[in-house]
Image: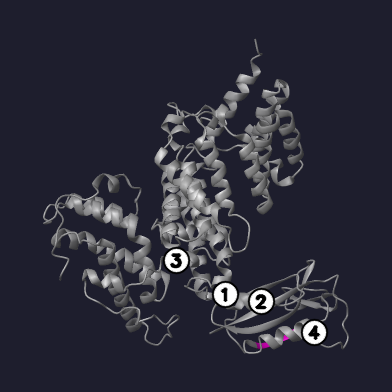
Amino acid sequence: MSDVGRTRAGPRAGPRAATSAATSAVASVAASAVTSAVASVAASAVAAAVAEAHRNEWAFVLAATVHVAGDVDTAEEAVQDAYASALATWGARGIPDRPGAWLTVAARRRALDIRRRAATAARALPKLVEPDDAALGMPGLEDDAIDGIRDDRLRLIFTCCHPALALDAQVALTLRLLCGLSTAEVARAFLVPEPTMAARITRAKKKIQGAHIPYREPPVSELPERIDGVLSVVYLIYTTGHTAPSGANLMRRDLAERGHELARMLRTLLPENRDVAGLLALVLLTDARRNARLDGERELVLLADQDRSVWDRAAIDEGIALVRESLRVRRPGGGQSRFALMAAIAAVHDEAASWNETDWGEILGLYDMLIDIWTSPVVRLNRAIALGFARGFAVGLAELDELGADPQLARYPYLAAARADFLVRLGRRADARIAYEEALVLTDNETERAFLQARLDASSIEPR
Amino acid sequence: MSQYLILIFEDDNMVQYAGTDGVSAGYQEFMQRHQAALRGGIALEPASMATSIRPDGSGGFSVTDGPFGESKEAVGGYFVVEAADLDEALQIAKEIPGTTGVEVRPVRIAG
């Protein structure tokens, strides 16, 4: 009982927690607790503290509970119970100094209870996984107890992002287990019905158990490949939030924020890794422009037309420092990190005082390096655009036309949109209109459609 | 420890009737290296020599020439391995020489 009696003066981190998107069951319980008036700590402060702990500590608490629980499902149940009990206990006894430690100890105790109950209920059944009691230690609720608890978040994320799972399942598990999103929230984020998402998550968890996907960090020999897989999942989460593939909002901010937080968590857990530094840099340097991407009418604003004064300079500075760090030393396998190269390209844009001052030669050089290690059709498209700005739009257009022959790009709306833009710049308005119409047919995001329609309308007006 | 079946796929056009030829040097070397994990394995004659049987729905059977599923890749053999977890099984599977690809499946009940 050394820490639970201590209380904090006043509400802690209220605004941040209140604006967080922790809309899970726990957060809604937290909201209802605001109305209960008998707590010794202000209920609103408790609710805010629990919501903040949900946002910041979920992955740590769950990862540390898996070893005690023996499987992911039991661990999830125990962690949910721990957050629920935090609402009552913190109200009565005060918010602990280290909420993550308190929650971890509570969740591990709860996991043990659930296991014992299950053992009594089904004594005859053999255990599927032998839970690790040695990892438990069963300390009291002292602050010191946490110091003996290993940070298992890397194990958890490597398990969620195991290549034996389908990519959409990796993404869903990462959001569910690392970010603590509910199945309904994950379903909403990816615009699939909740039962579909529930089935996807259940199937993935069954494969983890049935195929014995290990709960551990991969051996050094497999590390670069496995880290690349994890980074791809985190980047996919970020970009899905940054530019939603369809729907009315250009950005799904909460998802982009989760991607950002995951990138930062990986940086904390793998501070020496160049690829991780590259990914965090890329997210920072892209996200720095978020406030300039939509105008007052929620219309898409192209990089060329953005108000650069509202870009987040602190994020840009941090991102550039990370790019430098990431590119300074070559990776053990040779070659640069693709995330660091993409980040370096974003950095060139972020450092330009205006669109006209963009160093396209530098950007083209970086795309040439990127294409050497990653020949994705989208990278080739972006390189062709850079080529147009660096060497002339006719040169760029010829390259774009060549890419149109690639079946992977033939139905890619950004290719048609890029062709249309170059055609306008070359004065070929009739051809440009056809290209804009093609792009419109291929685009589902409504903000992007409005933008393309406006461009099409503008190109229909004859120049003076 | 768990058991995994590693199904070995080969491009069926490339597989010739091997007759009584022995195990290739590549496979001998592989089997030597993973002696401790291997619990069994066989190599098959080409899929063109397969016969498939399906219940015909009225108590009888429909017997057809050829493999069960038509595809360019056909099962050419298998190994059963004992491994600590999926990663270990995948590592062994990656070292099997001369395949079009392999499928690794956890064994539920071993005979």
Residue A348 against residue B10 in the figure, above or below: above
Viewer-proximal residue among A181 and A332? A332
Alpha carbon distance from label 3 to label 1: 16 Å
Q: Dot 2 corresponds to which residue?
A: B93
- Magenta stretch: residue A422 in it? no
| Nearest to N terminus: mark 4 or mark 2 | 4
* Residue A348, visible in the rendered structure: yes
Q: Which percent across, then down, holds residue A45?
A: 19, 51
Tell me the residue at 42%/47% (across/down).
A257
Considering every residue shown, the one lying at the far top of the view is A464
Amino acid of disc 1: Asp
| Nearest to N terminus: mark 1 or mark 2 | 1
Q: Are discs 4 and 2 located on one and the same chain?
A: yes
| Res A74 quadrant in image | bottom left
| Magenta-highlighted residues | B39-44
Alpha carbon distance from label 3 to label 2: 25 Å
Q: Chain of mark 1?
A: B
**Numbered circle sitting on residue A154:** 3
Q: Which percent across, then down, holds residue B108?
A: 57, 81
* Residue A238, visible in the rendered structure: no
> Contact (CB < 8 A) between labels 3 and 1?
no
Alpha carbon distance from label 1 to label 2: 10 Å
Specify the quadrant that holds the C terminus of chain B: bottom right
Q: Which percent across, then down, holds residue A53?
A: 29, 57
| Nearest to N terminus: mark 4 or mark 1 | 4
Alpha carbon distance from label 4 to label 1: 26 Å
Q: Secondary structure at mark 1?
A: helix
Local crowd size for mark 4, using a 10 Å CA cut-off: few (<14), some (14–19), many (≥20) = few
